[in-house]
Image (cartoon, rainbow, N blue to C red):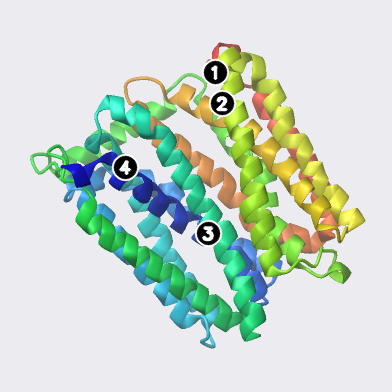
């Protein structure tokens, strides 16, 4: 029983949950940009990779029906490891774009399914007291995975680019290392994940009955009071960030003559994966502390300003094009800190709107709308940037912040929302 202490599996499980997401959604953007893919194509193709997280509520009931959560976790980790190896093997190929995208799709669907199983396993493997105790641990190791994927792996790829003088070979080695790391996680969890008695498939319930219950739950979400306004809020609150997130790395990488800042891959890894993540985390922590003390009714509008105004640093960077890394890192820190602080309001509203008889299922639907709100604007962000250029694109981002203010203003009973 000692080896099944939550310390032996909760940190590693949520590290394994966070790493493939950041690889699919962020590492792929940097890799394709370094491989010479245009901004419009990068945004479109990687934007589509959001789809599995958008539609994962559609197959989540069957993760309950078929086999145990533990079985799903280890199987999905094996598939993710295979997907990472597939990217590494096909990067040097002539048709690398189509082949690597196929493996990224495999990872995306496997990772979305892994999220469903891991979150369910967490509730089955821990009692209510331990669930509360380890919630901070799981969040911390999810953040560590983000730093590892968005920071350390990109820095490693940049180092290998300099050593090998071949972009495709450097990234291929990076993905081989990632595959090895994930296979180690798979082997570890195969041995160390516990076998909770409650973790079993619902064989007594037929698929048709489970589907009928799911459809009823799904319909009840749209019958909630103010559902239309809530959905608009979920889709549009992060409209600026959905576009900015796809174009920030290309902007930092592109040479100054093309309107970018001309940073190296290793510098991007440090700026986005370390400085940016620290700012995001600190902003989120402060947001949680302030809401816990005073309630969201008091901090809602300051959070809206916080998630919107700092986007202006990209307008400044696009016009000034500074070479000073300290100034660039400070600007990214400010933007990410504001985003982390303002994002707190968004997540708390999702929890608030999900309250009721079907809270778990309704929250999953909310997160699907959240992913959709990032997917569609992100897909067209590259086309808009190429049409406008970086300077006008970032001014467009500032104009899009008006959508954040408008949808927040339309929320009913918002001042009753508490932490």
Q: Say which residue label 2 marks.
A: 288
Circle 3 Cα neighbour tier, 10 Å, few/some/many (<14 / 14–19 / ≥20): many
Under circle 4, the secondary element is helix
N-terminal-most mark, 1 or 4? 4
The tag on residue 149 is 3
Q: Residue at x 51, y 73 (%)?
A: 174
The N terminus lies in quadrant:
top left
Q: Say which residue label 1 marks.
A: 292
The tag on residue 7 is 4
Does the residue at mark 1 contact the one at mark 2 (Cβ under 8 Å)? yes
Which residue of the protein is positioned furthest toward the left in this rendering? 204
Q: Is residue 131 above or below residue 170?
A: above
Where residue 167 appears, as percent x and y from the top left, is 62, 80
For marks 1 and 2, give the CA distance.
Answer: 6 Å
Front in this rendered view, residue 98 or 177: 177
Q: Residue at x 46, y 56 (%)?
A: 19
Where residue 189 appears, as percent x and y from the top left, is 26, 55
N-terminal-most mark, 3 or 4? 4
Under circle 3, the secondary element is helix
Give the number of the mark in front: 4 or 2.
4
N-terminal-most mark, 3 or 1? 3
Residue 3 visible in this rendered orientation of the protein: yes
Circle 2 Cα neighbour tier, 10 Å, few/some/many (<14 / 14–19 / ≥20): many
Give the number of the mark in front: 3 or 4.
4
Circle 4 Cα neighbour tier, 10 Å, few/some/many (<14 / 14–19 / ≥20): few
For marks 1 and 4, give the CA distance.
Answer: 27 Å
């Amino acid at each position: 029983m000692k080896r099944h202490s939550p310390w032996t599996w909760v940190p590693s499980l949520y590290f394994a949950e966070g790493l493939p997401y950041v690889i699919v959604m962020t590492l792929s953007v940097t890799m394709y940009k370094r491989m010479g893919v245009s901004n419009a194509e990068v945004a479109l193709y990687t934007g589509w990779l959001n789809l599995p997280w958008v539609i994962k509520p559609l197959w989540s009931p069957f993760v309950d029906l078929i086999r145990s959560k533990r079985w799903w976790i280890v199987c999905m980790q094996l598939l993710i490891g295979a997907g990472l190896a597939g990217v590494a093997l096909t990067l040097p190929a002539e048709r690398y774009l189509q082949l690597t995208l196929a493996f990224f799709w495999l990872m995306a669907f496997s990772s979305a399914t892994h999220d469903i199983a891991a979150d369910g396993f967490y509730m089955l493997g821990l009692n209510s007291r331990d669930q509360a105790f380890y919630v901070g641990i799981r969040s911390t190791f999810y953040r560590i995975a983000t730093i590892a994927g968005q920071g350390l792996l990109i820095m490693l790829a940049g180092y290998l680019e300099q050593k090998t003088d071949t972009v495709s070979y450097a990234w291929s080695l990076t993905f081989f290392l990632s595959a090895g790391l994930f296979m180690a996680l798979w082997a570890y969890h195969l041995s160390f994940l516990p076998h909770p008695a409650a973790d079993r498939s619902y064989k007594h319930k037929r698929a048709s009955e489970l589907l009928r219950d799911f459809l009823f739950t799904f319909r009840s979400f749209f019958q909630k009071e103010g559902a239309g306004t809530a959905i608009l809020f979920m889709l549009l609150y992060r409209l600026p960030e959905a576009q900015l997130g796809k174009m920030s790395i290309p902007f930092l990488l592109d040479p100054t003559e093309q309107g970018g800042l001309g940073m190296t891959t290793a510098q991007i890894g440090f700026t986005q994966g370390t400085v940016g993540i620290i700012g995001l985390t600190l902003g989120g922590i402060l947001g949680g502390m302030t809401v816990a003390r005073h309630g969201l009714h008091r901090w809602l509008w300051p959070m809206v300003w916080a998630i919107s105004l700092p986007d202006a640093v990209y307008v400044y960077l696009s016009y000034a094009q500074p070479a000073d890394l300290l100034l660039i890192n400070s600007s990214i820190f400010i933007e990410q800190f504001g985003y982390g602080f303002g994002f707190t309001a968004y997540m708390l509203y999702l929890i608030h709107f999900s309250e009721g008889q079907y809270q778990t299922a309704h929250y999953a639907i909310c997160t699907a709308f959240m992913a959709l709100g990032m997917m569609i604007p992100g897909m067209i962000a590259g086309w808009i940037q190429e049409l406008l250029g970086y300077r006008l694109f970032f001014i467009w981002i500032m104009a899009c912040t008006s959508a954040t203010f408008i949808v927040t203003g339309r929320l009913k009973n918002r001042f009753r929302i508490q932490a």
